[in-house]
Amino acid sequence: MAKIKRAGKGIVDKSGVTRWGSIHDVPDPFLFCLAWNHAWDVGEVVERPGWGTKVWEAIGSCDCGRRRKDVIDPLSGGLHSRQYTGGHGFLSKSRPDKKVARLEYFRRKRARQEELARMQKKSESETG
């Protein structure tokens, strides 16, 4: 049996893949990406030797920990290659369906909005 460790409410197996018991256990940054795809922040773009010419290499990162390296032809903009690392919860074949992730994302968002409205109302009643 594979040795496992806990990752929040998820479990990380020996290959580094995080598995969650249910959609309710998925941390917010992962849930956002499962529901809407990654919000890539591309850092520095560097020029590297490539296939007979120079290429651009761009590393993108997301709040969920996923990273993406794109190798791009600087003349045509064509994508030569793409590699992903990190964000191991996304490697699981048992990850939740996008529809399920969206519903959970909206459920959490509405709960936070309702809590904020209650706090504002309470604050107004205490000061007014």
Image (tube, rainbow, N blue to C red):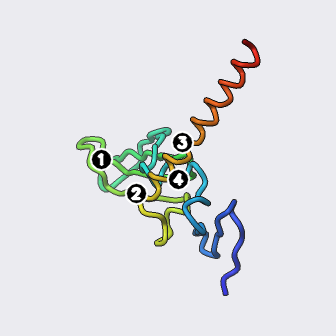
Q: CA distance from mark 2 to mark 1?
A: 35 Å
Residue type, label 2: Lys
Q: Secondary structure at mark 3?
A: helix
* Near-viewer residue (45 or 16): 16
Which residue is nearer to you in this view: 1 or 77? Answer: 1
What is the crowding at mark 1: few (fewer than 14 residues within 10 Å), some, or many (at least 20)? some
Question: In the orientation shown, which residue stands out farthest toward the bottom?
Answer: 1
At x 63%, y 74%, the residue is: 13
**Residue under the image location 41 percent in, 42 percent down:** 47
Q: Position of residue 76 (x, y in %)?
A: 23, 43
> Relative to 61, is 49 on the left or the right?
left
Query: What amino acid is found at the position of numbered circle 3 in the picture?
Result: Lys
**Which residue ends up furthest to the left in the rendered image?**
76
The quadrant in which residue 128 appears is: top right
Q: CA distance from mark 4 to mark 1?
A: 33 Å
Q: Report the residue marked by disc 1.
A: 73
Which residue is under mark 4?
A: 31
Q: Earlier in the sequence, mark 2 or mark 4?
A: 4
**Closer mark to the observer between disc 4 and disc 1:** 4
What percent of the width, then of the height, locates residue 127?
A: 75, 14
Give the class, few, some or many, for how many residues have Cα within 10 Å of label 3's Cα (few <14, many ≥20).
few
Q: Residues within 10 Å of mark 4 (few under 14, many from 20)?
A: many
Which numbered disc, 2 or 1, marks the residue that appears first in the sequence? Answer: 1
Query: Looking at the picture, which amino acid does disc 1 mark?
Result: Asp
